[in-house]
């Protein structure tokens, strides 16, 4: 059977771990928002492309990847 001090120590560790996880989640949400803004900014440029200098297959693939990343980020 666990002692009262063991339980208290475990609870304190869980409290600290939860706070650290909350901080990390906030940091990741901020990064996600920045990446989403960058992707939304870049998407029109990719969609327009430059026919004489851009490989259309690459452009279509890049657009699909950016659209997928935007959709995923918006779901979060």
Image (spheres, rainbow, N blue to C red):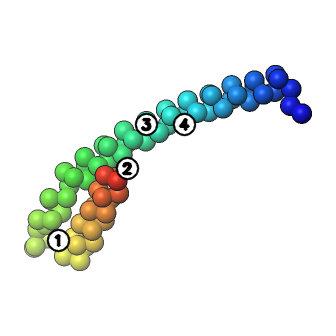
* Crowd around label 1: few <14 · some 14–19 · many ≥20 (10 Å): few
Cα distance, mark 4 to mark 3?
A: 10 Å
Q: Which residue is mark 4?
A: 21
Q: State whether residue 26 is above or below residue 74.
A: above
| Cα gap from disc 2 to disc 4, whole angstroms | 17 Å
Residue 76, which numbered label?
2
Q: Nearer the viewer, mark 1 or mark 4?
A: 4
Instruction: Name the spot of residue 29 as percent of width and height, x first.
Output: 39, 41
**Element type at mark 1:** loop
Instruction: Assign a secondary structure to mark 4.
Output: helix
Residue furthest toward the bottom? 57
Name the residue located 29 percent from the left edge and 56 percent from the top edge. 70
- Gap in angstroms between the C-alphas marked 1 and 3: 35 Å
Q: What secondary structure is marked by label 2?
A: loop
Q: Give whichever of 50, 3 is nearer the camera.
A: 3
Rendering quarter of residue 72: bottom left
How far is the residue under mark 2 from the one under mark 3?
14 Å
x and y, in percent, of residue 40 in the image: 21, 52
Q: Is residue 6 left or right of residue 24?
A: right
In the structure shown, which secondary structural element does the residue marked by tag 3 occupy?
A: helix
Checking the image for residue 54, the label placed there is 1
Residue 54's spot in the image, x, y percent? Answer: 17, 71
Image quarter of residue 2: top right
Q: Earlier in the sequence, mark 1 or mark 2?
A: 1
């Amino acid at each position: 059977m666990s002692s009262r001090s063991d339980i208290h120590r475990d609870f304190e560790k869980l409290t600290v771990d939860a706070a650290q996880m909350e901080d990390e989640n906030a940091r990741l949400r901020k990064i996600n928002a920045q990446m989403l803004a960058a992707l939304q900014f870049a998407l029109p440029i990719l969609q327009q492309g430059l026919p004489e200098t851009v490989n259309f297959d690459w452009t279509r693939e890049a657009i699909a990847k950016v659209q997928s990343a935007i959709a995923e980020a918006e779901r979060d």
